[in-house]
Amino acid sequence: MKRKSFIRFTAVLLGLTTLSGACGQANPVKDTEITGSEVTEAVSEAYLPETEEIPTETLAEEPVEDTATEEAETESENGEELSPVLGDEQFDAYLPLLYGKKVAILTNQTGIVGEEASFTVDDPYNDEDSLIRFGKDRDGNPITYGEHILDALLDRGVDVTAVFSPEHGFRGSADAGESVGNDVDEKTGVPLISLYSNGQTREPESADMERFDTVVVDMQDVGLRYFTYYISLLHMMNACAAHGKEMVLLDRPNPNGFYVDGPVLREEFKSGVGMLPVPVVYGMTWGELAQMINGEGWLREGRRCSLTVIPCQNYTHRTKIALSHEPSPNLKDMHAIYLYPSTCYFENTVVSVGRGTEYPFNVYGSPYFEGHSEYGYSFTPQSMLGASEPPFEGTTCYGKDLRTKPLQDIFDEQINLTYLIDAYHAFQALNTGESFFGKGSNDRFFVDLLFGTDSVRKMIEEGRTSDEIKASWQDELRAFLDRRRPYLLYEE
């Protein structure tokens, strides 16, 4: 298998990790007593395994001072850049924490150890490569993947008793919002337990929590508050805290982890597409986010989850990465992942985001824009795997194709509100009498849930510009950046 290639800068693992050797083998980061926005003088515990053999006695724990900072080398002796090493690749660091225990896994189709695949994109900055469909090579041929975390743990003698899966299911093929039932993995016979049904992410049931002692988390996210996988993580942390279970989180890079943007979620706008008081683009890995959930007291009744994070190596928040596996059915390439923070707001409006095409979130359009001079691109949504009965199925939509937009422009713009604002005003000029934002309830619309506030929609309706709207959330962004800093594992 070809090793996943990444572009990176310097990687600094702040304080909670010790390194050795050129690539550095990280010791597990035990969650520390960090509360509020201040770092207390706590000590982080690290397990120091010597082999992958089943231990015959309890592993000793040695403290790692939280004031220590180790800089990971990002170049080898011959000057070549080192690829990030994912948490799930570091078996020596976490297998001793699992042997002798009943183990569950929270994962899905993205839990490929080390992101190994027969074809990978070498340059995350390449515009053409960003449009290569996940699961295909440059010629459109199917690619093969390395071992899945489920197989990897079973092959190494871990007693895996259950697999929990988020929205879209263990195989990642269910539609957005589609209920996913429990099942059994045909290959391994391990029970598959869905945490998504009736359009909502749910918490594991008490009976399911009795299946395991420790849950391993290994799943690729895209770093947006309305991408629901982190809600499964939150619910699992709540359940582990309530039932006295341990969590070992195998950290992965965040493809949108190089910036922070968007309004912070208001409490009254919590929903199935937003559960934490963080910005739309929060710029953290799951390891960092889980530590913040614990430290900020965001679990029920102020509980804390017993959490150990296996950090990535050779990674910083300036690192750009190219995934090899689609994180969900309608994020089909890296270009879409980068546009997702700007185009998702068309969901449930009179504009399609391209569901039911091969390029969702790269395009948008509406039947209402037929003949409009600014919306000359057209597409017709059709039912397909991951998008059954999409909006405007079988109807030609007229809009814009963003696949030609350079990546650097997307990076520089961050959240781009002009797509939404321009489409809103174009629709209003038609005087149809219909609501651009769809059907609301109690003066609340789906776009309000995506933004985590109704202020953005109201400012658009008032005629505010993108710059004016984005200026409105800068103070809360600065406050969030300060608040999250104690929980960061990687250099900003």
Image (cartoon, helix red, strand yellow):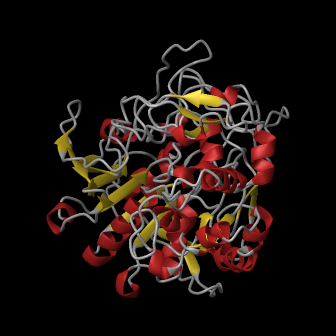
Residue 243: % across, % down? 25, 74
Q: Residue at x 60, y 43 (%)?
A: 337
Counting every numbered tag in the picture gives 0
Residue drawn at (44%, 33%), measured in percent from left and top? 356
Residue at x-position 59% and y-position 68% = 457
Return the residue nearer the eye: 58 or 405. Answer: 405
Q: Where 444 falls versus 4 (above or below)?
A: below
**Most extreme residue toward the right, as rendered?**
79
- The residue lying toward the viewer, choosing from 2 and 354, is 354
**117, 157: nearer the viewer:** 117
Q: Is residue 126 left or right of residue 395?
A: right
Residue 271, percent across and down?
40, 69
Q: Nearer the viewer, residue 111 or 325?
A: 325
Describe residue 231's horizontal placement relative to residue 170 as left or right: right
The correct choice, above or below, for 248 with respect to 481 in the image is above
Let me know if residue 50 appears in the view: no
Q: Is residue 229 left or right of residue 377?
A: left
Tell whether 51 sits left or right of 300. right
Identify the image quadrant of the C terminus: bottom right
Q: Residue at x 37, y 28 (%)?
A: 384
Q: Position of residue 69 (x, y in %)?
A: 74, 67
Q: Is residue 444 visible?
A: yes
Pick out the residue farthest to the left: 207
Which quadrant of the figure has residue 129?
top right
